[in-house]
Image: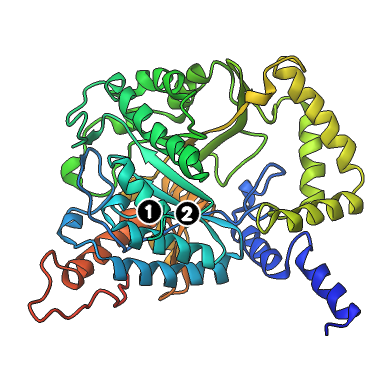
């Protein structure tokens, strides 16, 4: 029998606002940030330790994209389920140690749907076991049968209550069955609708909820089509629209001139045109603004309403009080546990209640008042994520690895952006969480070269399975 005092202790530990391991990980992440990004709006190190992604798992893809961030020999590597599952398990175990619980993590490599559905599911379950919230990264060019085989077990029962996918669809991608060589984004509107409908059917047929993100690479050729992509797709069920200006990373044979003619302001202006309103991104900051601009909000009827107006001091004060009351991630764990955690936060910091109430009233007014169609409101996030060119990343990473002083302005900027990176890859063999730009621009070629030897397209004649061996970065 558990003594009452022991039971109370366990209850206290389970409903603390920030468990000790999460608090330690957040403090460590905050300490790693350069001083310039430690602003009152910063989420890294306060609300989250950032997002994560897998690497060295399945670099192969059946598309030919321009640009392609994978190294030139990625398609010489066999897609191998046991290797993927074992490597993902190792990486996520290390990420849990380094970054604490409740982090969002992408199952990413080449094309995730080239994995057998059971192996795909096993990798997602491994991520969940280590306290990650997984999202599969795909081009979406698969059928409902694959999605259902992933979501259901052999007896036809759901393996998951929810699934998250990031679906990349744009004209830089070559090889899609419905549009092998698209020349304009409107040619892909039908595909955007088809993919969203598959996940809607999964919810109707099996009760599995989904979070869909729409990703799009932006180049000078499709920049002006961004507003149309948003206006066409906003009602399809996508919860995030993420735009990545093309960078000189990965396979050099697939680069084109003019990528860096685009500025962040150029792209953000087109995103705002699609949303039909100004999108504030300084009220909540995710890493370095030179890497990420993010605006959270919701569609209320035809109107997009941002969560925070960064020009309204009342919203900023409400944000600060919310951050004080809720100093870490509260969205993990069972619903009753989260409810008790929230109640404890409000009881400990009473001023947060009127602050949130005032914010909610302003949010409703901005959305058209109480008579607006709130029951049909659709939470949606807009993101601009700018990768760095491989050359700039390599120079900055070399300085960080060797601790050498930096004085060249471009390299100083790159170093600061790497230190504030919100998207990193776990490397248990070196004990590092590596920024994604470093992974793609510096480490991927060496990892992929090892994978070519480890996982050749043709298996060894003796049938030995070498696929569970580990790959270390060069």
Q: Residue furthest bottom?
A: 1
Task: Determine whether 49 is above or below 297 in the image.
Answer: below
Q: Position of residue 344 (x, y in %)?
A: 86, 55
State the residue in front, 449 or 296. Answer: 296
Question: Viewer-proximal residue, 240 or 71?
Answer: 240
Could you tell me which residue is drawn at 86 percent across and 42 percent down?
A: 352
Nearer-N-terminus badge (1/2)? 1
Q: Secondary structure at mark 1?
A: helix
Instruction: Give the percent coordinates (x, y) of residue 237.
Output: 49, 30
Q: CA distance from mark 1 to mark 2?
A: 9 Å
In which image quadrant can residue 199 be found?
Answer: top left
Q: In terms of image quadrants, where is residue 442?
A: bottom left
Tell us which disc is closer to us: 1 or 2.
2
The answer to whether one can see residue 341 in this image is yes
Say which residue label 1 marks: 150
Q: Residue at x 21, y 28 (%)?
A: 179
459 vs 157, left or right, is: left
Dot 1 and dot 2 residues touching (CB under 8 Å): no
Judged from the image, the secondary structure of the residue bearing numbered disc 2 is: loop
Q: Report the residue marked by disc 2.
A: 158
Residue at x 23% of width, y 63% of height: 448
Q: Nearer the viewer, residue 338 or 2?
A: 2
Task: Specify the quadrant that holds the N terminus.
Answer: bottom right
Residue 156 drawn at (x, y percent): 41, 55
Q: Is residue 406 above or below residue 65?
A: below
């Amino acid at each position: 029998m558990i003594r009452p005092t022991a039971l109370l202790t366990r209850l206290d530990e389970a409903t603390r606002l920030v468990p000790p391991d999460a608090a330690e990980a957040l403090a460590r992440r905050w300490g790693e940030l350069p001083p310039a990004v430690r602003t009152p709006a910063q989420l890294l190190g306060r609300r989250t330790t950032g997002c994560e992604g897998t690497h060295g798992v399945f670099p192969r893809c059946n598309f030919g994209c321009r640009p392609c961030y994978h190294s030139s020999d990625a398609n010489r590597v066999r897609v191998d389920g046991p290797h993927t599952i074992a490597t993902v398990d190792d990486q996520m175990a290390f990420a849990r140690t380094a970054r604490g619980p409740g982090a969002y993590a992408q199952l990413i490599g080449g094309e995730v749907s080239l994995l057998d559905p059971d192996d795909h599911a096993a990798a997602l379950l491994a991520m969940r076991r280590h306290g990650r919230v997984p999202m599969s990264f795909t081009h979406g060019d698969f059928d409902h049968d694959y999605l259902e085989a992933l979501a259901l077990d052999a007896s036809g029962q759901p393996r998951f209550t929810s699934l998250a996918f990031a679906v990349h669809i744009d004209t830089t991608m070559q090889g899609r069955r419905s549009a092998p060589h698209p020349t304009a984004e409107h040619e892909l509107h039908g595909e955007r609708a088809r993919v969203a409908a598959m996940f809607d059917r999964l919810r109707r047929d099996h009760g599995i909820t989904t979070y869909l993100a729409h990703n799009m690479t932006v180049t000078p050729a499709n920049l002006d089509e961004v507003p149309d992509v948003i206006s066409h797709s906003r009602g399809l069920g996508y919860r995030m629209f993420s735009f990545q200006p093309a960078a000189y990373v990965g396979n050099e044979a697939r680069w084109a001139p003019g990528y860096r003619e685009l500025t962040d302001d150029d792209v953000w202006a087109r995103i705002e045109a699609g949303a039909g309103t100004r999108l504030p991104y300084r009220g909540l900051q995710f890493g370095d603004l030179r890497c990420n601009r993010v605006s959270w909000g919701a569609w209320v009827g035809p109107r997009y309403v941002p969560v925070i107006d960064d020009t309204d001091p009342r919203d900023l004060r409400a944000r600060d009080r919310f951050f004080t009351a809720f100093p870490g991630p509260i969205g993990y764990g069972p619903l009753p546990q989260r409810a008790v955690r929230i109640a404890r936060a409000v009881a400990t910091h009473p001023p947060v209640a009127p602050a949130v109430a005032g914010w909610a009233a302003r949010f409703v007014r901005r959305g058209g008042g109480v008579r607006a169609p709130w029951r049909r409101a659709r939470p949606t996030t807009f993101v601009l994520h700018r990768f760095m060119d491989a050359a700039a990343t390599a120079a900055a990473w070399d300085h960080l690895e060797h601790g050498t002083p930096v004085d060249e302005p471009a390299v100083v900027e790159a170093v600061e952006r790497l230190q504030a990176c919100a998207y990193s890859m776990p490397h248990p063999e070196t004990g590092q969480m590596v920024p994604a730009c470093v992974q793609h621009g510096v480490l991927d070629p060496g990892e992929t070269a090892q994978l070519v030897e480890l996982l050749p397209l043709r298996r060894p004649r003796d049938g030995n399975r070498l696929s569970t061996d580990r790959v270390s970065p060069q």
